Image: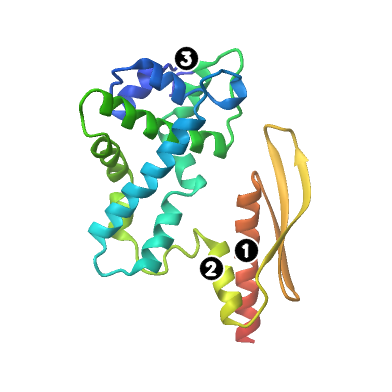
Amino acid sequence: MARSEDHPGDLEVRLGYRFNDPDLLREALTHASVGSPRDNQRLEFLGDALLNFTVALLLYRERPDWQEGPMSKLRGVLVRTESLHAWALDLGLERALKASHPRKAPPMGPKPLADALEALLGAIYMDSRSAGEDGVLCVRGLVEARFLASIREAQPGSWTLADPKTHLQETAARLGLPAPIYTQVDLTGSGHAPRFTMQVSVGSHSAQAEGPTRKRAEGDAARLLLDHLGTHTRA
């Protein structure tokens, strides 16, 4: 069972990377809501760019038979918030965030944890580079360990379930229908545990779904509308 008193050193063990500069790790674990003058937003910006670059490198190397379109779609699935949130949970990143700021723990929804994961990659790049190592190579090793199997096993079109909004947009265009329009119908729950109800409309067709984030609710609504459009066009 995971320990509630987790601390940054435990995170280093799970990562397989020991920071030379502990301040960089602390910065990566400092959410903007904490109010610190050094939060993780700058490292998140850097980590986001590194993540997209290293995933693109892996796709280019591993899928020589794919063109730009399929590579871009699979990269989008791999680096989306839900994917990074799952990676953060596997690392126990939420425990490290709470332990870093026990008196004012940041919100633990999917987006803050995904952002912290990107900030962590940025911190590893900066830390390894300052120690005279190849920062990109260090980050690429972590990204490859996480995503290599998924890239090798992916089949063209397998991302449609993971990226239903793009698939819906392409389906609407193929059917000669207007572009999808997303509308927030309702918002319930607390500030740290919201529930969004989103509706998507394509011409006279619509569907709605509820989720913990706008993006999740939009995606689920898009899946429902895709099913409806598939049934409608086959009728």
Q: Secondary structure at mark 2?
A: helix
Q: Secondary structure at mark 1?
A: helix
- When asked about the image quadrant of residue 158, the answer is bottom left
What's under tag 1, amino acid-wise? Ala
User: In screen coordinates, is 133 left or right of 125?
Assistant: left
State the residue at coordinates (58%, 26%). 32
Q: Separation of disc 1 and disc 3 at Cα?
A: 40 Å
Element assignment for label 3: loop
Mark 2 — residue? 167
Which of the numbered marks, if any, corresponds to residue 5?
3
Front residue of this view, candidates 122 and 176: 122
> Image check: 220 left or right of 3?
right
Q: Looking at the picture, which amino acid does disc 3 mark?
A: Glu
Identified at 31% across, 56% down, the residue is: 151
Q: Position of residue 203 (x, y in %)?
A: 73, 75
Q: Determine whether label 3 and label 2 are within 8 Å by CB.
A: no
In the displayed structure, 91 sits above or below 197; it is above
- Residue at image location 73% in from the left, 52% down from the top: 197
Give the residue at mark 1: 222
